[in-house]
């Protein structure tokens, strides 16, 4: 199967997953700026990776615009989203689903890959947003123990990426 992995990464986690997928299936892997200019008609499968920002998958609108034509041509479309939340967070499925209409959801396979935070590689705006979010959670009058743990977790850099998260993606490509 002729496959391409196109990814949008800010701090490296989405890129790492793209490279792992590419290496495992021996396919082309390109950053979004180059990938968005590719002729996707020559590929059987398109894997798109983006990271979560405020519940939205970055650059997903580009793929969604191409989805009707790709789907009509019988292309396999896979989206993986990388986030800082652990895989078992109840927020993950909600965030994943809200990025797609019912019709889009039927045409693609969607996967979550936990990543982490690397404040040293983040741009100023997302970094400030996360820091403010952590403070607001921690300072809530009715903050729960889970709230405090979440605030502590996102107040500094961490890496919870794992190759195991590409296994369902690779299975879908087989």
Image (cartoon, helix red, strand yellow):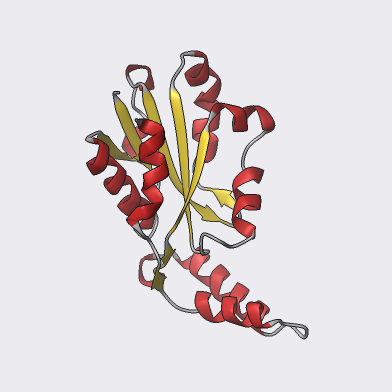
Q: Quadrant of residue 32?
A: top left
Q: Is residue 30 left or right of residue 123?
A: left
x, y percentage for residue 113? Answer: 45, 53
Question: Considering only vertical position in the picture, is 98 above or below 13?
Answer: above
Determine the residue positioned at 36% across, 54% down: 164
* Side (left or right) of 114 relative to 93: left
Q: Quadrant of residue 129?
A: bottom right
Q: Position of residue 4 (x, y in %)?
A: 32, 31
Eyeballing the image, is 167 above or below 41?
below
Name above or below for residue 123 compared with residue 95: below
What residue sits 46% from the left and 67% below the top? 124
Residue 156: in sight, yes or no? yes
Residue 127: image x %, image y %?
49, 69
* Viewport quadrant of the C terminus: top left
Q: Is residue 32 visible?
A: no
Residue at position x 37%, y 17% in the image: 41
Q: How many marks?
A: 0
Position of residue 59 relative to residue 132, above or below, is above
Residue situated in front as seen by the camera: 30 or 45: 45
Q: Residue furthest right?
A: 142
- Image quadrant holding the N terminus, namely top left
Residue at the limit of the structure toward the top, as seen here: 73
Q: Residue at x 31, y 43 (%)?
A: 21
Q: Position of residue 53 (x, y in %)?
A: 55, 56
């Amino acid at each position: 199967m002729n496959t391409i992995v196109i990814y949008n990464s800010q701090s490296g986690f989405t890129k790492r997953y793209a490279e792992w997928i590419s290496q495992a299936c021996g396919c082309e892997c390109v950053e979004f700026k180059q990938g968005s200019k590719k002729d996707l008609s020559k590929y059987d499968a398109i894997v798109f990776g983006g990271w979560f920002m405020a519940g939205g998958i970055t650059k997903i609108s580009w793929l969604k615009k191409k989805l009707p034509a790709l789907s009509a041509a019988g292309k396999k479309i896979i989206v993986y989203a990388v986030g800082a939340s652990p895989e078992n967070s109840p927020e993950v499925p909600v965030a994943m689903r809200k990025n797609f209409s019912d019709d889009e959801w039927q045409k693609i396979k969607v996967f979550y890959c936990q990543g982490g935070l690397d404040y040293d590689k983040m741009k100023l705006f997302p970094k400030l947003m996360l820091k403010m979010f952590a403070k607001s959670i921690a300072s809530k009058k009715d903050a729960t123990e889970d709230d405090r743990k979440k605030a502590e977790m996102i107040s500094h850099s961490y890496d919870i990426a794992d190759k195991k998260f590409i296994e369902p993606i690779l299975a879908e490509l087989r």
